[in-house]
């Protein structure tokens, strides 16, 4: 799914320079889901290659998590990094579902409030808030397969908040354990 165009969200069509598709790093069972591309991702067409990506990559590498697929709930950059709207998330949902169906992961690791809420909605899970949900492992059945939905904080939110940073690190360690790494 890396060769389509889309014009469902007029504001995003104006603010994006390209659609940022998910990226696969080696063979994987882990599917990492962020919110929307930032300026660097929009320029290069690769998810999580800016500041948030560095924070995430450092922690993944420390925990030997080298195999994963990474994507966003919204594939186009919102202007000035605003949050994607409910409508934009909803418009982009079929692409996320198609990615999950194509790649058939075992773990969905969601980053931040927006992506966690969107993925919870997709699978009929009740979202409270990210502080409550972070570190929680939800087991669901999707297309006859067991799938774990595991949320944590968005890496950007850990820059200035030590408590979030500590929890984020703890959750990535937990991710490597449940993935059997
Ligand atoms: N933040 C996200 O949520 N996704 C990206 O791709 C980059 C930053």
Image: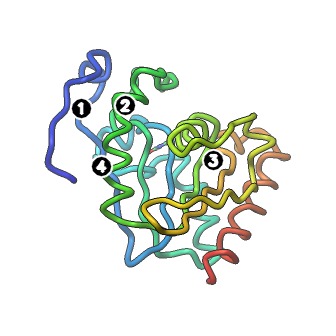
Residue picked out by circle 4:
21
Relative to the observer, which residue lies in front, 40 or 112? Answer: 112
Q: What is the distance, in whole Å, between disc 2 and disc 1 at their CAs?
A: 8 Å
Tell me whether the residue at label 2 lies in contact with that at label 1, contact meaning CB atoms closer than 8 angstroms: yes
Q: Which mark is residue 155?
A: 3
Tell me whether the residue at label 2 lies in contact with that at label 4, contact meaning CB atoms closer than 8 angstroms: no
Sequence-first tag of 3 and 4: 4
Residue 39 sits above or below residue 66 on the image: above
Q: Is mark 3 within 8 Å of ligand 1?
A: yes
**Horizontally, is 22 left or right of 5 in the view?**
right
Q: What is the distance, in whole Å, between disc 2 and disc 4 at their CAs?
A: 11 Å
Sequence-first tag of 1 and 3: 1
Helix, strand or loop at disc 4?
Answer: loop
**Horizontally, is 41 left or right of 169 in the view?**
left
Residue 68 sits above or below residue 22 on the image: below
Residue picked out by circle 1:
17
| Discs 4/1, front | 4
Sequence-first tag of 2 and 1: 1
Residue picked out by circle 2:
77
Helix, strand or loop at disc 2?
Answer: loop
The residue at the point 39 percent across, 35 percent down is 39
Q: Label 2: few (<14), some or many (≥20) within 10 Å?
A: many
| Residue 122 on image: x %, y % | 50, 41
Give residue 126's quadrant in the image: top right
Give residue 38's quadrant in the image: top left
| Residue 150 on image: x %, y % | 65, 57
């Amino acid at each position: 799914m890396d060769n389509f165009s889309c014009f469902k969200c007029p504001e995003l069509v104006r603010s994006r320079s390209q659609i940022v598709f998910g990226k696969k790093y080696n063979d994987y069972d882990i599917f990492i889901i962020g919110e929307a591309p930032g300026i660097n991702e929009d320029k290069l067409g690769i998810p999580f290659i800016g500041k948030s990506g560095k924070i995430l990559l450092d922690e993944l590498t420390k925990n030997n998590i080298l195999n994963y697929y990474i994507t966003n709930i919204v594939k186009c950059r919102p202007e000035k990094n605003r949050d994607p709207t409910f409508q934009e998330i909803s418009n982009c949902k079929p692409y996320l579902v198609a990615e999950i169906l194509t790649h058939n992961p075992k773990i969905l690791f969601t980053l931040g409030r927006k992506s966690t809420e969107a993925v919870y909605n997709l699978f009929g899970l009740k979202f409270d808030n990210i502080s409550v949900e972070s570190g929680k492992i939800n087991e669901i059945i999707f297309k006859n397969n067991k799938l774990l939905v595991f949320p944590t904080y968005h890496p950007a939110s850990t820059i200035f908040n030590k408590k979030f940073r500590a929890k984020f690190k703890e959750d990535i360690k937990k991710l490597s354990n449940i993935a059997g790494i």
